[in-house]
Amino acid sequence: MLLAETGANTMTTAVTSLMSVVSTVMTTITGNETLMVFFCAGVVGIAIGVVKKLRTR
């Protein structure tokens, strides 16, 4: 096996593992009301900050 093939396989495995972790985290957040409130509050806060910055330009 060539070194490039090994690197590609390693990257594929890493991305697959990362997507699995992200999927597990998102499933946990959406299944728990308390976590969902904290997650949404953070996203709403970020959106408000972005809108304020865009309005001041």
Image (spheres, helix red, strand yellow):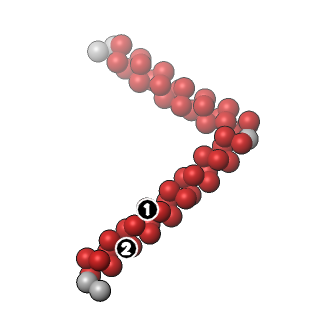
Q: Residue 37: x, y in percent?
A: 67, 32
Point 54% across, 26% down: residue? 44
Residue 12, relative to residue 23: is it above or below? below
**Left or right: residue 11 compared with residue 43:** left
Q: How many marks?
A: 2
Residue 26, relative to residue 11: is it above or below? above
Q: Residue furthest right?
A: 33
According to the image, label 1 marks what residue? 15
Point 61% across, 29% down: residue? 41
Q: Quadrant of the C terminus?
A: top left
Residue 31, relative to residue 8: is it above or below? above
Type of the residue with mark 2: Asn
According to the image, label 2 marks what residue? 9
Q: Residue 38: x, y in percent?
A: 65, 35
What SS does tag 1 mark? helix
What SS does tag 2 mark? helix
Q: Residue 47: x, y in percent?
A: 47, 25
Along the line of sight, the residue nearer the viewer: 45 or 15: 15
Q: Residue 42: x, y in percent?
A: 57, 32
**Left or right: residue 6 compared with residue 27:** left
Q: Which mark is residue 2?
A: none
Q: Residue furthest bottom?
A: 1
Q: Of label 2 and label 1, which has the lower sequence position?
A: 2
Dividing the picture into quadrants, the one containing residue 33 is: top right
